Image (cartoon, rainbow, N blue to C red):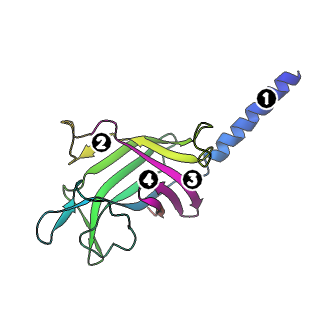
């Protein structure tokens, strides 16, 4: 009898944990900007490439024409899958311009939120992260299919507040603001 009560209690505890865990990141679409590597093509024309250093400052650069970004949309609206899309853009004179074929259009379909295990470094144990593999890509340098093999994206969830999430990326901690539909 005691064993069955303990099992039922454990089951209820796990169920409550999963229900609460699903509410940590509010549903919706979040938009942020990640820097793209830039190559100089002509005297004053810059385009996304892979041959120069990364630009890490993604906030103070929106007025410069030589800064390209991926506008990243993270869609938390589905129950089991998180869709991450990256669209290349640049800002010129404070106006956002979308690329037609430069910079690579990326989709990471059916990404998941997971937790670091006990084997992870101590500062990451038990923390949540978002992980996905590339499912669709246009205008990419790579295989004949256009989708490079084994291309992944991973974001560590730093904090969640009303209307925004802070994610640690390869560019540092970036804010993704909730997009109103």
Q: Residue furthest bottom?
A: 93
Q: Earlier in the sequence, mark 2 or mark 1?
A: 1
Is 154 one of the magenta-colored residues? yes
Foreground pick, 42 / 84: 42
Q: Earlier in the sequence, mark 4 or mark 3?
A: 3
| Residue 14 higher or lower than 56, as above or below | above
Q: Earlier in the sequence, mark 3 or mark 1?
A: 1
Residue that carries the numbered disc 4 in the rendered image? 74
3D distance between C-alphas at marks 4 and 2: 15 Å
Residue that carries the numbered disc 3 in the rendered image? 25
Q: Secondary structure at mark 1?
A: helix
3D distance between C-alphas at marks 1 and 4: 36 Å
The prevailing secondary structure element of the residues shown in magenta is strand
Foreground pick, 123 / 147: 123
Residue that carries the numbered disc 2 in the rendered image? 136
| Residue 118 higher or lower than 167, as above or below | above
- In the image, is 73 to the left or to the right of 41? right
Residues shaded magenta: 148-173
Q: Earlier in the sequence, mark 3 or mark 2?
A: 3
């Amino acid at each position: 009898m005691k064993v069955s009560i303990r099992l039922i209690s454990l089951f209820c505890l796990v169920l409550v944990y999963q229900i609460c865990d699903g509410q940590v990141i509010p549903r919706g679409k979040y938009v942020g900007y990640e820097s793209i590597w830039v190559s100089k093509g002509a005297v004053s024309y810059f385009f996304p490439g892979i041959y120069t250093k990364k630009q890490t400052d993604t906030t103070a650069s929106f007025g410069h024409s030589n800064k390209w970004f991926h506008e990243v949309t993270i869609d938390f609206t589905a129950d089991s899958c998180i869709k991450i899309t990256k669209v290349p853009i640049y800002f010129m004179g404070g106006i956002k311009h979308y690329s037609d074929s430069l910079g690579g259009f990326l989709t990471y379909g059916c990404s998941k939120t997971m937790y670091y295990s006990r084997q992870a470094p101590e500062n990451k144990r038990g923390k949540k992260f978002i992980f996905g593999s590339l499912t669709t890509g246009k205008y990419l340098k790579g295989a004949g299919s256009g989708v490079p093999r084994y291309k992944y994206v991973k974001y560590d969830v730093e904090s969640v507040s009303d209307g925004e999430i802070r994610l640690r990326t390869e560019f540092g901690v970036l804010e993704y603001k909730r997009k109103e539909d």
